[in-house]
Amino acid sequence: MQDRIPILHMSNFLLVTIQVDMHDRLALQLQDDLTEKISATGAQGVLIDISSLEMVDSFIGRVLGNISSMSRVLDAKTVVVGMQPAVAITLVELGLSLPGILTALNVAKGMELLSRD
């Protein structure tokens, strides 16, 4: 079992590609790691690629929202990319609106969003 999700620092941004099934402890670890990394690097944006996730429950959805809120406090934008249609449907059915999270279809479009002033 993987203890951490890798966070890549690229220019002024952090890139997270989730390639494993998220469980609650891993999601919380990612939240902590991202907050520390934003603070340490002064990153202006965080791009989270969830294209490999087939399911997102309400807890993971809330953690994504928390990551976005914490990033904003640290002066960084958050973009979630690659959301599967089934994941989007589940989030809507759970009533999670994920305020403050920008979304994009893919990594390229997400980087464009982060690059805008």
Image (cartoon, rainbow, N blue to C red):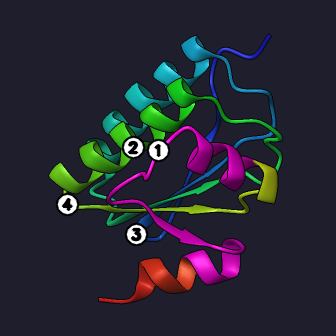
Q: Specify whether 26 is left or right of 95.
A: right
The location of residue 25, given as percent across then percent down, is 56, 12
**Label placed on residue 96:** 1
- Residue, disc 2: 65
Alpha carbon of mark 1 to alpha carbon of mark 2: how far?
9 Å
Sequence order check, earlier mark of 1 and 4: 4
Q: Quadrant for the C terminus, please.
A: bottom left
- Residues at marks 3 and 2 touching, judged by CB atoms closer than 8 Å: no
Instruction: Name the foreground residue: 105 vs 19.
Output: 105
The location of residue 78, given as percent across then percent down, is 41, 60
**Count of numbered labels shown in the rendering:** 4
Which amino acid does the dot numbered 2 rest on? Gly
Alpha carbon of mark 3 to alpha carbon of mark 2: how far?
21 Å
- Residues at marks 1 and 4 touching, judged by CB atoms closer than 8 Å: no
**Label placed on residue 75:** 4
Sequence order check, earlier mark of 4 and 2: 2
- Residues at marks 1 and 2 touching, judged by CB atoms closer than 8 Å: yes
The location of residue 110, given as percent across then percent down, is 58, 75
Instruction: Name the foreground residue: 36 vs 24.
Output: 24
Q: Residues within 10 Å of mark 2 (few under 14, many from 20)?
A: some
Which amino acid does the dot numbered 1 rest on? Leu
Q: Residues within 10 Å of mark 3 (few under 14, many from 20)?
A: some
Q: Residues within 10 Å of mark 1 (few under 14, many from 20)?
A: some
Tell me, yes or no, whether the highlighted magenta stretch contains residue 91.
yes
Q: Nearer the viewer, mark 4 or mark 2?
A: 2
Alpha carbon of mark 1 to alpha carbon of mark 4: how far?
23 Å
- Report helix, strand or loop for mark 2: helix
In the image, the segment drawn in magenta is: 87-110
Q: Specify whether 78 is left or right of 5.
A: left
Alpha carbon of mark 3 to alpha carbon of mark 1: how far?
29 Å
**Label placed on residue 12:** 3
Q: Is residue 114 above or below residue 102?
A: below
